[in-house]
Amino acid sequence: MGGSPVAAQEASDDDAARVVVRVAGSHVDSASNPLPPPGSATPAAEGEQEHTKPEAPAEAAAPAPVEAKQEAATAAAAAAGVQAMAVTVVRDVEAGRVASTSDQGGDKPSWFTPKRLLVMFCIINMLNYVDRGAIASNGVNGSRTKCSGGTCSPGSGIQGDFDLNNAEDGVLSSAFMVGLLVASLIFASLAKRYNPFRLIGVGLLVWTIATAGCGASFDFWSITICRMLVGVGEASFISLAAPFIDDNAPVAQKTAWLAMFYMCIPTGIALGYVYGGLAGKTLGWRAAFFGESILMVPFVILGFVIKPLELKGFSHNGIKEYGQMLTPEVQDQINNNGTKHVMPGGIDDLAGKVPQKFSFSRFGRSLMTEIGLFSKDMKELLQEKVFVTVVLGYISYNFVIGAYSYWGPKAGQQIYNMTSADYMFGGITIVCGIVGTLAGGITLDKIGSTIPNAFKLLSGATFLGAIFCFGAFCFKSLYGFIPCFSVGEILVFATQAPVNFVCLHSVMPHLRPLAMAVSTVSIHVFGDVPSSPLVGLLQDKINNWRSTALILTSILFIAAVFWFIGIFVPSVDRFKEESEHGVPAAERSNLRPLLDDNDEARTSD
């Protein structure tokens, strides 16, 4: 086959013959699977042939049966037009393979390190939640126009400008979850085909445009649509950021690194209260959204210009099997010869390389294939009892936290006559959020980062935190409320790192983006999305913020019960298990994240 455009290489470490398609004269190298040029053999390969076949003469008069089959397969493939297709594809693949080799090797980005990755993701996460805190602040959210005794006091903020009741105001706070619900699952699925880091960049761009749109909105429906698009932008980040951090964190500090990342949730919400209060009262509520959009622009640029990273369990440039570039007849003929065909990564995207006439039937088949793969992954994910248990508790937990974050300043202002509720709740949340989240992550690392230990920490901290928060709203004095509620918030926020550790480590590596997407969608769709309008509706009925707060806080006990049950569910840490691509341990170096150093170096950080 030396003169054929298609060359076959027999792998000595595999029982089945493996045919690698390449073009004569092209040079496609891989650090893990170097390919010799057609018609040539390396000295090591020649020595191995002599060792494994000592009886064979130096030049065989007739080809062996296996070689004859390979020759027949090659001729059939060439007759089907493989040569023209391979020439087109390999030109595109060649550049990608070289880039992939350099990325996975020692040529790592000089500026990009795991710690800088963590810092960048933390800032982005904080900006996401600053937006949530800002729209809940009295400065941005405002109040409706009030009339009594024939005199009316003008409203302020969004609620005053658009004349929203409490139920509509609650819907507005949760509108972005509609975009989040759809886009999170889509981004998690796209991570198998496209680089996850680039997907984050796309999502941040959508977020930036949507927040600017919120500032330019002119009525309830326009700002509601923009809030939905904010959810679309946030979806890519929340699904993919945590797996990146988990991949690149030092082994002994994984939960602590996750704690630093999730610490930005309460910190961002608290800063949002303060930022929204200041911006809303001085520059107007629209300026608050414009400011958020401007702050995100540098990270949008970074998402598109820096070298993309790879996630554990995914390889977008590695050697992949192919099957679509051959006709079914030729494919069946070659498969019947017992050979396994592999090609450089990117061949499976042949439809995008070779111009083809659009066909609705082809599009329909592709769509059904994607839906089938997604259904398969979802079925596998929902069979993980540990994952389902932790998410059920997380839903109950987030139902309370979501309502706290939105209605907290307004409830505090009404119950305790706080003159600056935004600053008070913002200060309590930022201090308790930082202390509690870091304490939870560090504690789990100290006692041992295992799934049962995580459930013990989750159930205990949530139960005690519920007691303190419930007791805080029973105090009639502000001086009794503040210390009791602060202790409760520290305990409640201690769950952030452990709950996400369980979500990441209770599933196979290739399912982590989908697991984070399903977890996030679930806690929002069944948690804080209904909680904000439901609490607003409850308050409209009973008109007593203290009773409303007590009813809401009691739901934390349900979360503690779910997580207590999780202690007794059999669990296995699946982080180091083989990915869906079936790559053996000896070849997993190609699937390591770009920033993954050797274990000793990473442990010593």
Image (tube, helix red, strand yellow):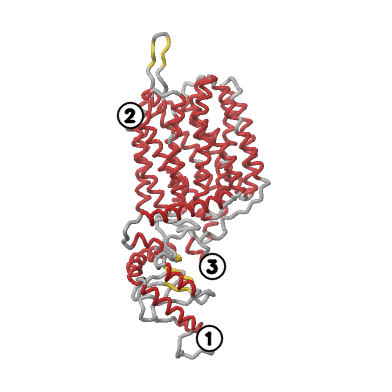
The x, y position of residue 431, in whole percent, is: 52, 35
Secondary structure found at label 1: loop
Q: Is residue 405 left or right of residue 349?
A: right
Q: Please, what is the three-letter code of the amino acid marked with disc 1?
A: Lys
Q: CA distance from mark 2 to mark 1?
A: 80 Å
Could you tell me if the residues under marks 3 and 1 are in contact, i.e. CB atoms within 8 Å?
no
The x, y position of residue 601, in whole percent, is: 52, 59
Q: CA distance from mark 3 to mark 1?
A: 26 Å
Query: Which label sits in the foreground, 3 or 1?
Result: 1
- The disc at residue 586 is 3
Q: CA distance from mark 3 to mark 2?
A: 59 Å
First along the sequence among labels 2 and 1: 1
Residue named by callout 1: 53
Crowd rating for badge 2 (residues with CA inside 10 Å; few <14, some 14–19, many 20+): few
Residue placed most toward the observer, 349 or 395? 349
Quadrant of the rendered image containing residue 324: bottom left
- The disc at residue 234 is none
Q: Is residue 452 left or right of residue 163?
A: right
Q: Please, what is the three-letter code of the amino acid marked with disc 2?
A: Phe
Note whether 355 is above or below 305 in the view shown: below
- Residue at 57% from the left image edge and 53% from the top image edge: 252
Secondary structure found at label 2: loop
Residue named by callout 2: 218
Image quarter in which the N terminus is found: bottom left
First along the sequence among labels 3 and 2: 2
